[in-house]
Image (cartoon, rainbow, N blue to C red):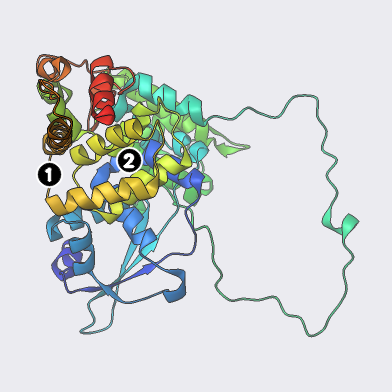
Amino acid sequence: MSMKFNQRLKPNTEFIVYKTYQLSSDHRTILSDLYLPLIGTGAFSLYFYLHESTRDDNILKIRFHREVIDELNTTLSELTTYLDKLEGIGLIRSYMSTEEHADRFVYRLSSPLSAEKFFKDPMLSMYLFSQIGTVKFNDKKERLTYPDLPDNLTEVTKKFTDVYHQTNDHNFTVPNEQFKDENTSRGPTVDLDDFDFEVLFTHLKGTRVDKKFFTKEASRLIVQLSDLFSLNAYDLKQILLASTSPQFGIDLETLKREARKYYQKESGKSVPTFTQQEKNEEMENLSYFERLDRVSPLDRINDLRQHQVSENDLKVVTEVIVKTTLENGVINILLEYALQMKDGELPLRYVMTIAENWQKEGFRTAEEAYKSIMDFRDSQAERRKKKSYNKGNSGESEPAWLKDRAKDKISDRKIRKNQGTLKTAREDEALSDMINKFREN
């Protein structure tokens, strides 16, 4: 957002959501697996809230930013940051009214790129790699790949005119209205004016790289590579000479490969360094509950499901994030608890009932949510003790697994920015025993 945009964005400023498509299960998978590590939970929640809160029976409804601030329990400053992230990564395009005395914004939502386009976009794929590391990057890539068609095939599909017969009706005209459309993201938002192409063209005079080869797609990629690898016009001249032929022009895949090779040769680094909001070293020194407070619920359910997340899992977690103001740690404890109590299932109504109750109670941390479970267990045990007149105390001391959490260290490979592979309840015998005893009482 520009400074002028920021100055006009107030809680009572009007906005309209322009959405021409519905999110599919594939969209949700791409968003949680690929976009979430880049934009964070705040921007992720905002994107889903704008989607889910925009009803098809009341399109282009005028709303106020105060609604979003209240629903997401955020601030105007944070909302602006979330919008910036969504704009920069290409999931939202923002427009401002030009009418005098009319402070109104239109947010045009875009569906995420396909896995194919995401991984082949140099900015997005390299930024994801820098955020999650080699192991998780390769894991995500492997789970989203799809095999090619077998060899030795010849297409025998019939043409339209082979099956259908055209009739002429003079009353028919082709519609020219605006219809619902996928409106897929264009990828990271870049401005062609951010790079001085005239200087580049001066460097390229007398070479085989003709100005006519600079299509909009090629120019956009050049701006991306310039930003990504900090390349100037002279650098790009060398790269373009190795990526262009007089017959076929600029080969975009070769251009990306040559840019990466040039960067590695000149800098001595394999990939550029991106700024991370969370540092792995900081995560290592946190307690178990503090780490849960930092980990995204979508990353947590991914770990709990051992990277086999169902569409229902994504729906339930997203509903909790969007429709409550619970913090990450509270949601993470809720997910562990619900999976144990419901034998590995996540019933939406059950989860939302607990989430709404915990929201009313005002729990803000994983530790507070955990304590509420233990307090409930103790009160239930005490009531049964009085009722049955059994001697002895049915309460348990603090489990050993919890005492040991503060001493544990988790490697960089296990915990990263807002994301990490923590032990699941099924893998942690002490945690599993604790919850099972709670269920038996």
Residue 275 appears left or right of 211: left
| Amino acid type at mark 2 | Leu
Determine which residue is flagged by label 2: 36
Q: Quadrant of residue 339?
A: top left
| Amino acid type at mark 1 | Arg
Please name the residue shown 22% across and 18% down the image: 412
Residue 364 - label: 1
Residue 119 appears left or right of 63: right
Q: Nearer the viewer, residue 322 or 180?
A: 322
Q: Is residue 278 above or below residue 159?
A: above
Task: Identify the element where label 2 is drawn.
Answer: helix
Q: Quadrant of residue 12?
A: bottom left
Select label 2 or label 1 by which is in front.
1
The percent coordinates of residue 345 (x first, y second) are 41, 36
The percent coordinates of residue 334 (x first, y second) are 26, 38
Task: Identify the element where label 1 is drawn.
Answer: loop
